Image (spheres, rainbow, N blue to C red):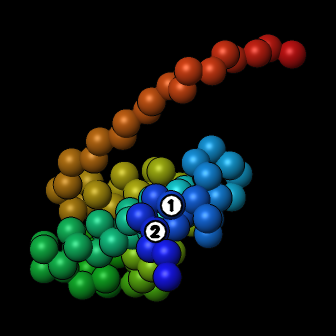
Amino acid sequence: MKSYSLDEAQDLLIGKVGTPRRDQFEFELKLELIGEMIKTARKERQLTQEQLGELIGVQKSQISKLESNTKNVTIETILKVFEALKAKVNFKVELMDTEVKIA
């Protein structure tokens, strides 16, 4: 039986880095992590989903959805949540070594 490293397994099962399928997987994984960070920060602040919702003006169900599925959320909402949680947010933008072409 052949063993594989995590990188090799991901390349085989999801696709190599830079392919559309792999890019989509990486994007969804990052969104899932944002939801987990919100949940962890909320619990550290000893807030219920309902209390956090009241702080930013949304229903408990919206906080629940945000923590479990951040696919349909705006950056503005994410920033409001972290602001209410008194959490610092950093975004890293990294330009790739590709040329931008204008049509």
The three-letter amino acid code for the residue at tag 2 is Tyr
User: In the rendering, at what x and y percent does residue 52 appear?
Assistant: 28, 74
Question: On the picture, is 87 further left or further right than 94?
Answer: left
Quadrant housing residue 51: bottom left
The residue at the point 56 percent across, 21 percent down is 97
In this orientation, which residue lies closer to the viewer: 34 or 63?
34
Under circle 1, the secondary element is: helix
Q: Residue at x 26, y 54 (%)?
A: 83
Residue 43: name its quadrant: bottom left
Secondary structure beneath label 2:
loop
The residue where tag 2 is placed is 4
Residue 57 visible in the shown view:
no
Crowding near the residue tagged with mark 1, few <14, some 14–19, many ≥20 C-alpha atoms within 10 Å? few
- Give the tally of numbered discs: 2
Q: Position of residue 28 (x, y in %)?
A: 54, 63
On the image, numbered disc 1 is attached to which residue? Answer: 8
Residue 31 percent coordinates (x, y): 47, 62
